[in-house]
Image (cartoon, rainbow, N blue to C red):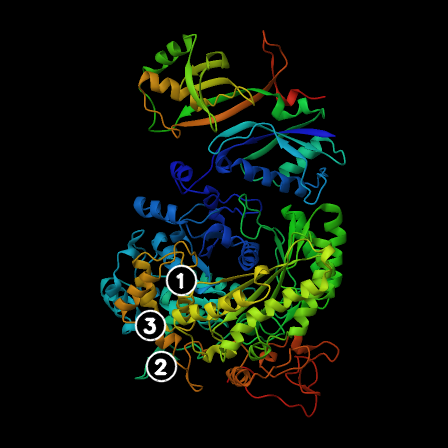
Amino acid sequence: MRMRIRYSKQGLMKFIGHLDMMRYFQKALRRAGIDVTYTEGMSPHMSMSYAFPLGVGMTSDSEYVDVDLNTPMPPEEMIGRLNESAPEGIHFIKAVQIGITKAEKGMNQVARADYTLSFREGYEWDTLWKEAFAAFLRREEILVIKKGKKTEKEVNIRPLIYQADVSGSEIHLGLAAGNENNIRPELLMEAFAREAGYSCTPFMFRINRDEVYGDTGNAQEHAFVPLIDLCL
Amino acid sequence: MEYKLALPEEVLLLVSKPERYLGNEVNAVKKDPTKVDIRFAMCFPDVYEIGMSHLGIQILYEMFNAREDTWCERVYSPWVDLDAVMREKKIPLFALESQDPVLEMDFLGITLQYELCYTNILQILDLSGIPLHAQERLYLRSVPVGDGRKTGAADACAKNGASGGTSIAEDEKEQGRELLVGEGAPIVVGGGPCAYNPEPIADFFDLFYIGEGETAYDQLLNLYKSCREKGTTRREFLRQAAAIPGIYCPMFYKAAYNDDGTLRSFTPDTEGVPKRVVKQVVTDMDRAPYITKPLVPFMQITQDRVVLEVQRGCIRGCRFCQAGMIYRPTRTKSLEVLKKQADCLLLESGQDEISLSSLSTSDYPELPGLVNYLIDEYGRTKNINISLPSLRIDAFSLDVMSKVQDVKKSSLTFAPEGGSQRMRDVINKGLTEEDILRGAADAFRGGWNKVKLYFMLGQPTETEEDRKAIAQLAEKIAETYYDTVPKEQRVGKCSISISTSFFVPKPFTPFQWAVMYEPGDYLGFAHTVNQEVKNSLNHKSIRYNWHEAYVTVLEGLLARGDRRVARTIEAAYADGSLFDAWTEHWDWERWVRAMDETGLEIDFYTKRQRGEEELFPWDFIDTGVSKKYLLEEWHRALRAEVTPNCHVRCNLCGAAKFRSGVCFNEEEGCLKTRAGSEEVYVYPREGCNPVPGIHIPEGGGAS
């Protein structure tokens, strides 16, 4: 049976990279005595997959990992056991059973992610930026150069911005995510800063990932649902 | 979410592997600093992933933290990128758990695992803002971060006690009063194998702990607390600490030298300070504290597994091996205790690999029972890897290894250390060519075709023939493969790799009297082996690599150095030396400059033939094994005579004075030593009757 686990990654855990988080998670499952299925072959490893790797430096309220269990365990018990040995900054929130088809894997479902950005102390822009940002978003076309491993192409990211609000000193963004059209929040902010003449360094924002969604709608109309609710 | 970091986030995102500096690992201990009396920073002076792989620190970490009044935290060397930032921004070095400055701690414990970390020790002190010299710390609370690099060689000479007593202390006496316990920098205490010759770094340490940490630290911490309550001076605390068994306080000892530069005398100059320091030994391994909450790092570390120590000490008595002498007597844990410890380690860590640790795991009497337990409980059902280093290759070990690893991928390791039988007899490596070839043949039949061979070059009495024999042995192993495995069963060639390191004589070994060579000589030795490999029939199956020669000579200097070497270490550090154990950072030229500037003649320490009567800088330490015994062994080595191991017979080395382990006869309830076939009882255990007519050997280590 396949379970989806949601956890938050906060505080100084933001410095722990994705590969180390995977290593952490495998050990956490063993400490919790959760009987996870192993792959066959000479060097068996745990059958688990992350929906959407988080970059170093970002915090998150919604990290998703799918694991296959050999022996079922009630979701509440799983979460309780995982939290017992969790370090400061990691909190397991919920586990649900999900389908086992390829399309139901978290990484194949991801369609949108919400972020909250705030300025680090000393990196704030002047007071006029909010208006400029609103004007920037009113345009029908926002062209940015997206760099792939080998390719560079110009993309219009405006249709991929589902939400962009400023409240107080915080910026709330809802952006396309996943395998096909992934927009990093920094990419949008850099595009704006370049155009509006603001300085922009990767370090200047604190970024939190608030939620990750799948899309149960169609090409005409999106219907975003948090990954944890895409359960059986 | 609230959290505290010593480093600005911008710095953490800039440097490589920020995980090194965060703490917060699973099972890391957090305490309320206002509710403890003693803050202890435990340091491994190398980078995090090396230091975190060390077993001893984890044992002590848990032992200290078991005390309610003590919070023990960890400190590692900042890597070169962060080192530069900390110097530039004057960020003081911090302990991982609390992120508080090391300077605020009560103790800074530094483990000394290899000589090449000595410049890293100075980095730790320097980045902490701790005055480098113990004498200065009596009067001076702190110094600016990174100032240790500013002192030139001349300063280093003036500040080190070696160059003429305690000038610095005299200077500062005039400037201010002596500091009280708890007022100034942490008490800097060293321990670990290199503490068995602490002299080259003696000026930098307040105390050394000689021996195994499990026994006397409580006494030291309790003394610290009571001295602080009473308001005694730092000096007075150190003086009282020096009276605790196993504690050595260098500032209370004076070294005098003969005209030829050798040591004339080494004596305490303060009342209540003992002439000799006796090493500390755990007598009951089953009851000694062990890890129950293993630290689980986020990043991949060098030895990323839990470690089960099965025994301490080694019965073998290889004459080059310091560990084999200083950890005597050999003491084992019982099978029942080991099973419980293994269960606990794996459960609490969630690690997927367990490694058995000891100097010679094959000599652990209950190894089959232990290995079968691990395979049945964990290997088969729970996908836990079982790692078995330092096993002798024989039928049993091959059987076990075929169960726990992929035969096709793994390689087998032999450590004959000497190429010829004569050489192996000189070093007392109880391994014959027949053993090696039989082991290899068994392994080839079992499906292995990769073999690694480890040797040392530059050992006493070694000749051209002995060096060539290294290549010849590899050739015989290759031939064994082609003779043993029929053509149709072979999967390609066999692969034999030879590695040679250059021998460094260490204190408290029979080879402590041995001479070393020039770097060029060492490279010549390696060249001989290389030529012989090239000339061998199966040279395509054999690969050869050798270690750096210059670094060997430096190790030789630091291993058998005296107090006068401290200024050279300081000058090398001031000139930029750091991470000398890392090939990419190590720079021989810096050390040459440091030796020139401080007037140190390296040949005196490395190439000089030491006299048999010579007083060594480390002779004030009593390891149990007597100097008389080491000298006998040195003579036997020169005659290429082997000495049987401790299971075969007792050779009266002196370690029986610790009344434990292999020296103890369980049935009789007495300690025993055996000379030849005749049983001789010595040192009756407290509470049991002395055996009449016994012979008690002279010295018992204290000669």
The spot of residue A49 in percent (x, y) is: 63, 32
Q: In the figure, is residue B352 to the left or right of B219?
A: right
Q: CA distance from mark 2 to mark 1?
A: 23 Å
Residue closest to the eye, B91 or B69: B91
The residue labelled by disc 1 is B118
In the shown orientation, is residue B599 left or right of residue B424?
left
Residue B612 shows which numbered tag? none
Circle 1/circle 3 CB separation < 8 Å = no
Q: Position of residue A119 (x, y in %)?
A: 39, 25
Report the residue at 68% width, 63% height from top.
B482
> Mark 1 — on which chain does it sit?
B
Q: Earlier in the sequence, mark 2 or mark 1?
A: 1
Q: Is residue B30 above or below residue A154?
A: below
Q: Secondary structure at mark 2?
A: loop
Q: Few, some or many C-alpha atoms within 10 Å of disc 2 (few <14, some 14-19, many ≥20)? A: some
Same chain for mark 2 and mark 3? The answer is yes
- Residues at marks 1 and 3, CA–CA distance in whole angstroms: 14 Å
Q: Amino acid at mark 1?
A: Tyr
- Residue at image x 68%, y 55%? B342
Q: Position of residue A79 (x, y in %)?
A: 66, 33
Q: Which mark is residue B564?
A: 3
